[in-house]
């Protein structure tokens, strides 16, 4: 005896399929009208086209930055530099590969040495870590909102990280920057200089020698000094 198939069981899946196909078509049509300024497909820092990105803020632009930063409390938690409390500290190299989303930046690192947190990552491991205040689309360009510059592939860094809470569910391990202003510190690169006041006119790719962004000599001195003190805690 043949089993009868109800009309409802045939029609409902067909309608759902048409709705999904329609939604995809509308999405593709809408996306085609959005101008691609070059960052959506960037997989490496070198893929960022010149003339499309600049920074949006530098320390010292506000009058209150200098006295506030000279106290150094902005970098501390319970009287200790926040970076020193990170569960993961490692010496790494930056591959140059990136994952850029609206306001978030992922950078791929290769671990050279683990100083703390061997239960979370290991020497030779290659993974992405993420931080906030990345690129945001503005009128006519992209603006990088972090005062901590992205890494430079020419240097090694000491990174201060924590595990992503999603690592328990994903095969690919990811990490989060533990400190906003001192999530990583360049090794052997010397001190960072103060930016000129017209920094907004400088192409982002021309700023790779700057570890952070400051237009105040006082703020620059504090940021360089704190970096030196943190590195000294680990023998650098």
Image (spheres, grey):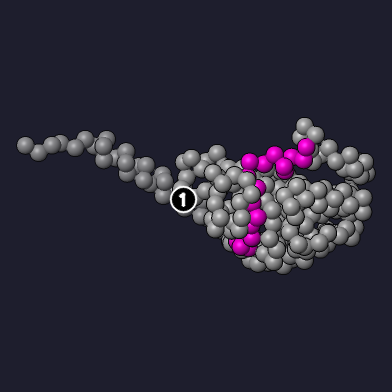
Q: Circle 1 — which element?
A: helix
Q: Is residue 102 magenta?
A: no
Say which residue appears at 82% left-offset and 39% top-offset. 74
Which quarter of the figure is the N terminus placed in?
top left
Which quarter of the figure is the C terminus placed in?
bottom right
Please identify the quarter of the rendering in which residue 112 is found. bottom right
Say which residue appears at 27% left-offset and 35% top-offset. 8
2 lies left or right of 220 = left
Residues shaded magenta: 80-101
Callout 1 environment at 10 Å: few (<14), some (14 to 19), or many (20+)? few
> What percent of the width, then of the height, locates residue 20?
42, 46
Instruction: Look at the magenta stretch and give its main secondary structure.
Output: strand
Q: Nearer the viewer, residue 72 or 106?
A: 72
Report which residue position mark 1 lands on.
Answer: 24
> What percent of the width, then of the height, locates residue 6?
21, 35
Say which residue appears at 86% left-offset and 60% top-offset. 193
Say which residue appears at 56% left-offset and 55% top-offset. 123
């Amino acid at each position: 005896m043949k089993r009868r198939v109800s009309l409802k069981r045939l029609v409902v899946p067909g309608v759902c399929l048409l709705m999904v196909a329609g939604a995809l078509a509308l999405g593709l049509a809408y996306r085609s009208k959005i101008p691609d300024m070059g960052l959506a497909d960037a997989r490496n820092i070198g893929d960022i086209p010149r003339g499309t990105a600049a920074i949006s803020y530098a320390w010292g632009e506000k009058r209150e930055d200098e006295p506030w930063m000279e106290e150094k409390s902005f970098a501390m938690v319970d009287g200790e530099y926040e970076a020193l409390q990170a569960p993961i500290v490692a010496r790494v190299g930056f591959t140059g590969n990136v994952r850029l989303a609206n306001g978030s930046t992922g950078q791929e690192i290769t671990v050279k040495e683990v100083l703390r947190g061997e239960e979370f990552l290991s020497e030779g491991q290659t993974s992405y870590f993420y931080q906030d205040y990345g690129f945001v689309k503005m009128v006519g360009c992209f603006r990088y909102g972090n005062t901590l510059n992205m890494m430079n592939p020419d240097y090694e860094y000491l990174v201060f990280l924590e595990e992503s809470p999603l690592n328990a569910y994903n095969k690919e391990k990811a990490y989060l920057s533990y400190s906003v202003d001192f999530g990583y510190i360049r090794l052997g690169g010397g001190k960072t200089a103060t930016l000129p006041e017209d920094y907004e006119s400088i192409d982002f790719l021309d700023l790779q020698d700057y570890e952070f962004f400051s237009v105040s000599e006082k703020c620059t001195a504090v940021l360089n000094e704190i970096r030196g003190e943190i590195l000294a805690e680990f023998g650098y």
